[in-house]
Image (tube, helix red, strand yellow):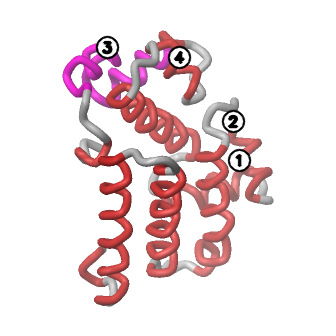
Amino acid sequence: DLHSFPTRRSSDLIELAETMQFELAHCREGYKVAVLNAFYGILLLASRHCRFDEGRIRRYAPRIGHVLSYMEQHIKEELTLEDLAREAGMPVPLFRRVFVETRKVAPITHLIQLRLRRAAILLRGTRLSIGEIAAEVGFRDSNYFSHQFHKRYGMSPAAYRKDRFGHYFLDMEV
């Protein structure tokens, strides 16, 4: 909750968000790195603010954070629950339980949501084909991608692009 952040941290978050917005609006050389840097800064501030009630969750929070970053960096790859648990250095049942307790969603569901959000950004900001976008975000089957996209956004990727083309991701539909 932003309101419970200390005032200095709130202004840091706002500054990072404004940096992202500026970089995306102007697309100067290196803007992608600047956006990712600001995003990771926001993640860092948020993770330092989080207070976990349960000791087990607090103990494993850095591992879950590592896996979230790993998902971002390896979004195009086929990732299984076993791969993610191995990356966290945890047995699959414990990893799944802790992930769900901290993120309120199953790991593979989170990965699919991450891929769909990235696809929405690409649909709005590039002229890549829908098949190319599906592959770019880790879907091997463009029909499955279209089905999942429709389930999440209520329209096909083509309709979404037609409806949203030209807008960047700070429209906050997700």
Label 2, label 4: how far apart the Cα atoms are = 19 Å
Q: Residue at x 33, y 48 (%)?
A: 26
Marks 2 & 1, CB-CB < 8 Å contact: yes
Q: Which residue is mark 3?
A: 158
| N-terminal-most mark, 2 or 4 | 2
Label 1, label 4: how far apart the Cα atoms are = 25 Å
* Residue type of the residue flagged with mark 2: Leu
| N-terminal-most mark, 3 or 2 | 2
Reply yes or no: does residue 145 show up in magenta: yes
Q: Nearer the viewer, mark 3 or mark 2?
A: 3
The image shows residue 142 at horizontal and vertical percentages of 51, 12
Q: Which residues are magenta?
A: 144-165
Task: For label 1, count other residues whose C-alpha is less than 10 Å away and answer few (under 14), some (14-19) or many (20+).
Answer: many
The image shows residue 39 at horizontal and vertical percentages of 46, 60
Q: Residue at x 30, y 80 (%)?
A: 11
Q: Which residue is mark 1?
A: 84
